[in-house]
Image (cartoon, rainbow, N blue to C red):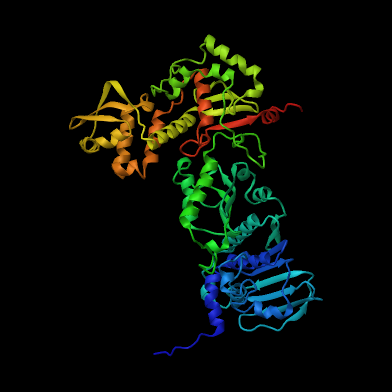
Amino acid sequence: MATIKPLPELLINQIAAGEVVERPASALKEIIENSIDAGATRITVQLLQGGIKQIRIADDGIGIAKDELVAALTRHSTSKISTLEDLQNITSLGFRGEALASISAISTLTLTSQKAGQIHAWQVQVDGKSITQPQPASLTKGTVVDAHNLYSNIPARRKFLKTEATEYVHCEEVIKRMALVQPDIEFSLHHNGKLRHQFRIADILQRIESVLGGEFIQSVLPINERAADIRIHGVVALPAYSRASRDKQYFFVNNRFVRDKLISHAIREAYRDVLHLDRYPSFVLFLEINPADVDVNVHPTKTEIRFRDPRALHQFIFHSINKSLSAPSREVQTGLTDTIIAKSIPHYPKHHSTNAEKIAQSTGFYQSLFGAEDKELNIPGADIEMKTPLKREESEMLAPIANEKQNFPPLGFALGQLHGVYILAQNNNGLIIVDMHAAHERVMYEKLKTAMDAHDWASQPLLIPVTFQADRADVVFVEENLEVFEQVGFELAVLSPITLAVRAVPAMLQKADVVKLIYDLLGEMRDYGASQVLTAKRNEMLATMACHGAVRANRMLTIAEMNALLREMEATERADQCNHGRPTWFEMSMAGLDKMFMRGK
């Protein structure tokens, strides 16, 4: 049996390098973090063959003194911490003292630096086995780390690296993350001698736009919330900008990019009501928290962290994002022709009706479209053709619009319908286009949620019960779960082993296709269980009900009913998106329309 003995220092470093330097991008990240900790304002990165052949990082930071160069390449040597108290209150990005030692163990590395106040720069080299003594070198300021041939001395590990293109993409992603969190530093990235990216010093929104593009910045909402000594700020994208992957999700804790299940779950929950389950939200968020309340010393890569009070943090993140997504209709919505987004995106306050609106939105119209005391959803204008002349009261209703241009509500006043699908409205800024069904579906969904939370399900008995045939299994299921249906406003009865009757429905849904709605609810309840649908899956159930209750496409509404829907949208949370994350309305400004029609040219 082999005897127990200490491992050689080189082998120790090579083993450690497997955790710290998983690929060229890992080495790049560690070196850039050192540059940032050194106070650099300009960082230049040069890569060859995706970083496999060479990684060269030059910065203008404070530099490393001559007699500290060798120590910088020794494991567990750092200037960042010296006591346990320092470890529990880490404010720097690097602190473990492993990065340069690990990189030098698997490559040929040259470290050149000029400390402020030194006459000239000094340089050391290491080939994985030995370190040279410092030699004079040419450098005006800062530090240059030049690593060649990663994993050249560990062929078994090198074969696990991907193609040059793949490794470059990972390195590029590191630069993007660093650029997002450090807008006060200029970054440039060269690959195989070509400049690929240059991010100049800018404010945070300009930096986000330069890194993630104009389409992203046009689709975001700002967040800036604080509670005690915790602050979250940044931007979250509208649900309409959802992605098929997590490629535009950036979360930073005390300027450190992290991937954390707790944080991901909180964000996912905030988007739950407005996003398809197979879509992912996009965001750039920065969390500032007391360093003593977060443990970053979980893994050598430092992308995994732990929080002292995870439950409180989860609620804080969830409510901060949910607050932004839940606000009533915003002044800036994803544009059709407008391409400039304001750096600050104000939210509309809930609208208070003017006298003109009170004429336009009579109590009867609100009751007919959304239900009031009688909870009815009745569309009296559904059978009216667009060519039908306006009734006198509707004509009078339009008159105040021209006289109160400065008093337009956020979503304006309705002008008419387009093919029975879209509502066209005019506000102070220009033209509003509303997806009638999607908008009404969101309004209905929020009303159903409120009713369920308040246990206020008003049922509407049907004058003539609706009977229909069903599978024997469905009939048995209904018979066993009659109370569950009653909890959400339905009164069902079993007439025979294959016949069901609906005697009452939720008041808000009395105009829905009752039979199809019951079939859909039965499908969900059978799949997940009746009690589960009322708890964990309740929002999916309510979304199904809202979809059936919403006014359908190709239904012709009166002007008053259109305006009623617009006013409800302004007062409804998350009215900017339907239940599936698609936008419910767009605004085309007068400037955008003028540009489209080349007015003024």
- The image quadrant where one finds the N terminus is bottom left
Image height of 90 relative to 66, above or below: above
Q: How many dots with numbers?
A: 0
Image height of 107 relative to 263, above or below: below
Give the residue at the far top of this rendering.
Answer: 392
Give the image quarter of residue 177: bottom right
Q: Whole-percent x and y of residue 410?
A: 59, 29
Give the residue at the far left of this rendering.
Answer: 496
Q: Is residue 306 visible?
A: yes
User: 266 or 54: which is nearer to us?
Assistant: 266
Q: Residue at x 59, y 21 (%)?
A: 354
User: 446 or 521: which is nearer to us?
Assistant: 446
Give the residue at the far front of this rendering.
Answer: 228
Image height of 226 relative to 366, above or below: below
Q: Whole-percent x and y of residue 229?
A: 57, 55
Q: Residue at x 65, y 79 (%)?
A: 71
Q: Whole-percent x and y of residue 601?
A: 77, 28
Q: Is residue 138 left or right of residue 413?
A: right
Q: Residue at x 46, y 41 (%)?
A: 273
Give the image quarter of residue 360: top right
User: 84 or 591: which is nearer to us?
Assistant: 84
Q: Is residue 389 visible?
A: no
Q: Whole-percent x and y of residue 439?
A: 49, 30
User: 438 or 39: which is nearer to us?
Assistant: 39
